[in-house]
Image (tube, coloured by chain):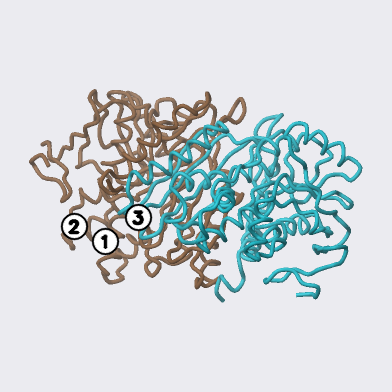
Chain colours: A brown, B cyan
Amino acid sequence: MRINEIGEFKFIDRISGKFKDLLLHGFLGIGDDCAIIPYNNKEDYVITTDMLIEDIHFLKDRITPEQLGYKSLAVNLSDIAAMGGKPLGSYLSIGIPAETEVEYLDAVMKGYHDLSQKYQVQLLGGDTTKSKQYLVINIGVIGVCKKGEARLRSMAQSKDIICVTGFLGDSAGGLKVILNQLPETKDHLQLIRSHHLPEPHIKEGTWLAQHPEVHAMIDVSDGISSDLSHILRMSGKSAIVDLDKLPVSDTLKRVSSKQSWDIDKLATSGGEDYVLLCTVKAGDFEKLNGDFRGIFGSDLFPIGEITDGENLIKWIKNGKQVFLNQYGFDHFNS
Amino acid sequence: MRINEIGEFKFIDRISGKFKDLLLHGFLGIGDDCAIIPYNNKEDYVITTDMLIEDIHFLKDRITPEQLGYKSLAVNLSDIAAMGGKPLGSYLSIGIPAETEVEYLDAVMKGYHDLSQKYQVQLLGGDTTKSKQYLVINIGVIGVCKKGEARLRSMAQSKDIICVTGFLGDSAGGLKVILNQLPETKDHLQLIRSHHLPEPHIKEGTWLAQHPEVHAMIDVSDGISSDLSHILRMSGKSAIVDLDKLPVSDTLKRVSSKQSWDIDKLATSGGEDYVLLCTVKAGDFEKLNGDFRGIFGSDLFPIGEITDGENLIKWIKNGKQVFLNQYGFDHFNS
């Protein structure tokens, strides 16, 4: 049986089952945005890692080296943000084809340093090695969060309001602009920017984790249809999501309208938004959102509700249930 | 300028210089076997990471998947051992070509689990992703050591005895057996085993780190000519190494004699031995070695001495100085 027949998540399940016997008290292992490792009486460490491979996760001629360095770190910082953590240090392994220009690598490291500096993240170590043909980047990030305050995927409660900390779909729109080689209009460049230079929501994440009414949290890396499912599966819940409430930028609306793109599909399944999705105790949402708006100048966008059930998302559009399949949404089950 | 023109270590120097400004008090960053991260009043965390790429670090048809899983983790545990640390948990990122058999990956994970179990190392997280063509494995390991007792490359002192915790050259011999496709004799299989299933010297490392007379420490991954140089560079010292004192197994002696291999070259430059090299306060060596022998049943092999100077190794054979070049040792400077 080939790996592409069972997929990433089933393979991870196979592995995590086998290693359960070795897990120690006070540690959280496989299954969330980060692992948790004990630090001191007041804090825990959180650790995450991500691998990016040329021609799978990026095309060398479509992203500048600065952007590549920035984004490789950003997607890891986003995982720290999803736990409510503050990043402290990173580890960089890089597999480099022999003919790679040092100037290219210097530019990768400049983008990496720029983002490291913005959030004061140390580079603590790594590994540099030859690669046969493709550039390979693996990054690990260690962060810190208040003891017991890390937000897990398993913490959603029925009737929680589901909300996100920013626009959905811009990054996927940017990828379509790149792949379809659309002209360099202001709107198109804006979407490409969202795809190449996502801002990890670290400040938002640490702020949200200070509020006990914020229950589960995850970062939107694969699209909410996939990422919300992780929360539902780990929490043993279902959800209703109103597609009409998904926060979509005016830029994406304009471009999608011109290009006849399925905006709901981009916003739910496009991925790489790197905003946070969290669930908030129902009665406390308005107050929390007001405070959030006061600090961050933008809304916690409510998009649906956690319900009793077993890992099903009920999608609503114009007040009616619709179904998501690989082509987009329709009124019949996929 | 291409990366292969400046090499791995110069590239690392470029990076570490740029990131020095971000390093916090209490942390040790790039430049040793592990980074050091504060834990509590009594302990520090140590973290290391290593990347292995198919056709660069391993050939899929020359190493079984169990051995690959075992060895990928072993080389990381060896870095923890070199700090005097005890491993606690690992992170595994794996880039998998689509046509890879799940049974192959299960076998990789079995080898990984066997070694994890032996040293009680948790699997705390990771990333699984597609790879275009080559299998890519990146492992990070976090361990713990007593506060202030981690052994750094910079700690060597003049007149220290340089010693190693096991045989040198067997692994390089095993690689030659594999590449030359020599027949499966008992001796050849023994060398291949040393190459595929190195034992990380964790117990030796933690024991040595409890003794203040043990100064600098490193694991022998690239061969002592390279690894001892790291110690000399970081400590601002030179060294004399007596080739006649290098511990070489009878197996390697027999095979090298038959195959006319340069045994000194294998033992100094072959690499992947994953024993520890440490420097010990001169007057305390005999007592320490006696205690070590009592516990581990084998010697701390003394191979030379730290001297004043600037990162030069003086190699001695039959009482005379010899010089190491890319072809081996000769009596003239390379």
Q: Quadrant of the N terminus of chain B?
A: bottom right
- Asked if disc 3 and disc 1 are in contact, CB closer than 8 Å, the reply is no
Distance (Cα) linking label 3 and label 2: 31 Å
CA neighbours of label 3 inside 10 A, class few (<14), some (14 to 19), many (20+):
some
Q: Which residue, given by chain and number where applicable, does mark 1 sit on?
A: A176
Distance (Cα) linking label 3 and label 1: 25 Å
Whether residue A167 is situated above or below residue B61 in the rendered picture: above
Which circle, 3 or 1, is nearer the viewer?
3
Q: Position of residue A250 (x, y in %)?
A: 26, 54
Whether residue B174 is situated above or below residue A203 in the rendered picture: below
Work out whether residue A121 can be spotted: no
Q: Which residue, given by chain and number where applicable, does mark 3 sit on?
A: B97
Q: Nearer the viewer, residue B153 or A235?
A: B153
Secondary structure of the residue carrying numbered label 3: strand
The amino acid beneath tag 3 is Pro
Q: Position of residue B245 (x, y in %)?
A: 80, 54
Q: Position of residue A19 (x, y in %)?
A: 44, 32
At a point 61% along the width and 53% down the height, the residue shown is B171
The amino acid beneath tag 2 is Trp
- Asked if disc 1 and disc 2 are in contact, CB closer than 8 Å, the reply is yes
